[in-house]
Amino acid sequence: MALTSTFLAVGAPETNGNEGAVYIYACTGGQSCDSNYTNILMQPWGMFNGGYQFGYVLKTRDNVLAVSAPGVIYASNPFVYNNGGSGISPS
């Protein structure tokens, strides 16, 4: 899990046959977060099959989220996303 003042990210590395996912919840002032997720980040290379564990480790700084996928050895790792006010998107 990773928390900022604007979002909570919850990693689920064993989702979809260990492909993994990250669930994003909107937060207000770091005090309360929505009970329903507002976005799902899936592993960005969807054409490959399982075992990547996207969402295994999450780190935040300001509005930036870094997501690791320890099963990936041929792509940039971690994957970096930015919350620019209109939702989380790749940086």
Image (cartoon, rainbow, N blue to C red):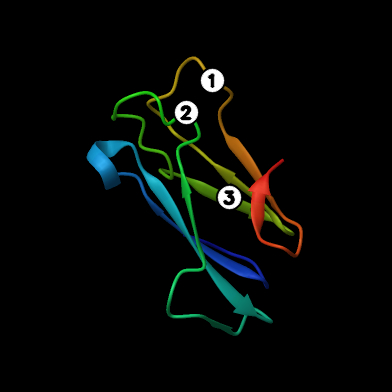
Q: Looking at the picture, how far across and down is residue 24, in whole percent?
A: 51, 62
Q: Residues within 10 Å of mark 1 (few under 14, many from 20)?
A: few
User: With 18 as the anchor, is 31 left or right in this view?
Assistant: right
Tell which circle, 2 or 1, labels the residue nearer the N-terminal end: 2
Residue 7 position (above or below residue 77): below
Residue 77 position (above or below residue 9): above
Compute the Cα span from label 1 to label 3.
18 Å
- Residue receiving disc 2: 45
Q: Looking at the picture, how far across and down is residue 68, in whole percent?
A: 49, 37
Q: Secondary structure at mark 2?
A: loop
Q: Which-is-in-front pick, marks 2 and 3?
A: 2
* Amino acid type, callout 2: Trp
Compute the Cα span from label 2 to label 1.
9 Å
Q: Which-is-in-front pick, marks 1 and 3?
A: 1
Q: Is the residue under label 3 in contact with that under label 2 (CB below 8 Å)?
A: no
- Residue receiving disc 3: 59
Q: Looking at the picture, how far across and down is residue 18, in whole percent?
A: 27, 38
Residue shown at 76% from the left, 58% from the top: 84
Residue 75 shows which numbered tag? 1
Who is closer to the viewer here, 82 or 60?
A: 82
- Quadrant in the picture for residue 30: bottom right
Q: Secondary structure at mark 1?
A: loop
Residue shown at 23% from the left, 38% from the top: 17
User: With 89 as the anchor, is 58 left or right in this view?
Assistant: left
Quarter placement of the C terminus = top right
Residue shown at 30% from the left, 26% from the top: 49
Q: Is the residue under label 1 in contact with that under label 2 (CB below 8 Å)?
A: yes
Compute the Cα span from label 2 to label 3.
20 Å
Residue 64 position (above or below residue 76): below
